[in-house]
Image (cartoon, rainbow, N blue to C red):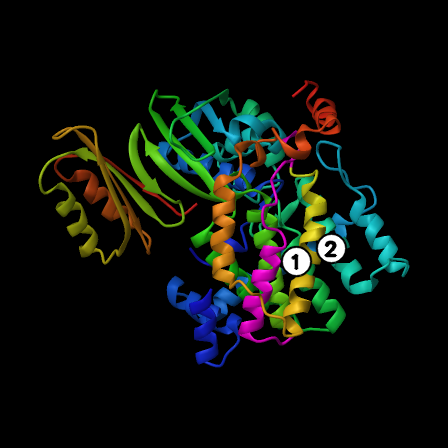
Amino acid sequence: MESLLEAAKENNCRLSALVLEQQAEQMELPKQEIYKKMRENYRVMASCIQPGSAPDLKSTSGLTGGDAYRMRTAVEQGKNLTGPLLGGALYRALAVSELNASMGRIVAAPTAGSCGIVPAAVLTMQEQYQLTEEECVMSLFTASAVGMVIANNASLAGAQGGCQAECGSASAMAAAAIVELAGGTPDMIQSAVATALKNILGLVCDPVAGLVEIPCIKRNASGVAGAFVAAELALAGIRSAIPADEVIWTMKKVGDVMPTALKETAEGGLAATPTGRKLHQQVFGEMK
Amino acid sequence: MNVFDILGPVMIGPSSSHTAGAARIGLVTRALLGKTPVKAHIFLHGSFAKTYKGHGTDKALVAGILGMQTDDERIRFSLDVAKKEGLEIQIETGELEDTHPNTAEITLTAADGEKVSLRGSSIGGGNILITRVNGMEVALTGQNPALIVLHKDAPGTIAAVTELMAEYGVNICNFHLARETKGGLAVMTIESDSHFVPELNEKINRLENIYSSTMLERV
């Protein structure tokens, strides 16, 4: 993370521009082509919101669906507590996540379990600050760069690192994108990434009935909220005491000592609660 | 790794490791067999074994075996498609040693009796790592075009293969070798930045000490 941000500072360019440059070189493709592919990803992300917040959406298991609609309705009627920015981010994160649970078409960001966080952050920034599509697409390169650093030094899989590795990584990626979209510096990006990860450190992966639904969908909402918290702090000039690279290293260490029961096996955490077990039985007709 | 391994793939939910990654493992197995399978034996380990029903991992693996891509809207119906296409499926769960929690072993059989078996792990974000082909160690990501070359462990075999590749201007980005015994069966897995042309593969297939060379496109 450090070296990447140093390079951006040295070249006096946005992190996203640097990442696009490096990727073009690595993939031996013109920048325009890589940009277009990322734009396609962004358009798929945007296309998830409408079907994902439909009132009658139901997951394949029947356990979830319709919450994005509830949140969206509250925001559109001006009734939600935290206004259109946070409310908008929350309903969008729920929408993409609920669409995923209903076996819809989404973009893994970085995983399907955490697919609502990055789109919710960027699409909401676009709406609230009238940003261009190009700015939003470019911010996805910054988000991806953060994801690559985490993938190389820790993990993006809930089965290996718990939910911190999935929603935590997505939250850090989203925080970086938000800071860039708000015109923040590379140092602010580093602080936002560190803070987003610190605040979700240790979160376990405990899906009820083994499905990417409960509590995953709501953790996408909290993941994007955490991204805005981290970005807001960083943009105000608040530095993370622990640098991002050390937080990422810590996330790996925490994931390593996390018991298997709390790493996507549906054996511990919320999956092992009386209600969690009952829901498992409801879906599969057998007691876990 | 590139940015699209992080933001991407575009896929059908609900789980990148348990759905998209699983479909890709299925796709690689199908590509290795190189023809239509009539029987699939699937052994699931770890988190795959424990949660496959909830995540639809079985549907995703079968979808891949049937040749469906990770964003194919038919994945959720793949078990019905398999039935219609006459693909017999057996699923077993259990424990394997020293392997990633999201691992499947697949054995496919074609109508003419030809078989291929593979061990693949879904390592997060839809990315995969194939660690065994026909019982021998390999290291394949499916992210690059690759050649899987079964050969006799004999001096000069690797040189002959790589010399041909150099002739065709193919740059190797990943090379892995494993063998059963000295002088016995060995396997090279070679990943490249660029596409292999069929002609190159045919030439490799005709080399001395080569049993088979299979071309695998990026999946």
Determine if the magenta segment contains residue A163.
no
Q: Secondary structure at mark 1?
A: helix
Measuring from the top left, give residue B100's x and y in whole percent.
43, 35
Q: Do the residues at pointers 1 and 2 share their chain?
A: yes
Tell me the kind of residue under disc 1: Pro
Q: Chain of mark 1?
A: A
How far apart are the two marked residues, 1 and 2, measured between alpha carbons?
A: 8 Å
Indicate which disc, 1 or 2, sits on the residue closer to the N terminus.
Answer: 2
Measuring from the top left, give residue A57's x and y in whole percent.
78, 41
Q: Can you say which quadrant of the picture contains the C terminus of chain A?
A: top right
Placement of A123 over or under B49, stated as above or below:
below
Measuring from the top left, give residue A9's x and y in whole percent.
48, 78
> Magenta segment, which residues?
A182-211
Query: Which residue is denoted by mark 1 in the rendering?
Result: A119
Q: Quadrant of residue B208?
A: top left
Circle number at residue B178: none
* Neighbour tally class for label 2: few under 14, some 14-19, many 20 plus, Cα within 10 Å: many
Placement of B36 over or under A230, stated as above or below:
above
Please state if B109 lies on the left or on the right of A158 as rendered.
left
Query: Which residue is denoted by mark 2 in the rendering?
Result: A92
Q: Are marks 1 and 2 in contact (CB under 8 Å)?
A: yes
Compare residues B110 and A149 and report the one nearer the observer. A149
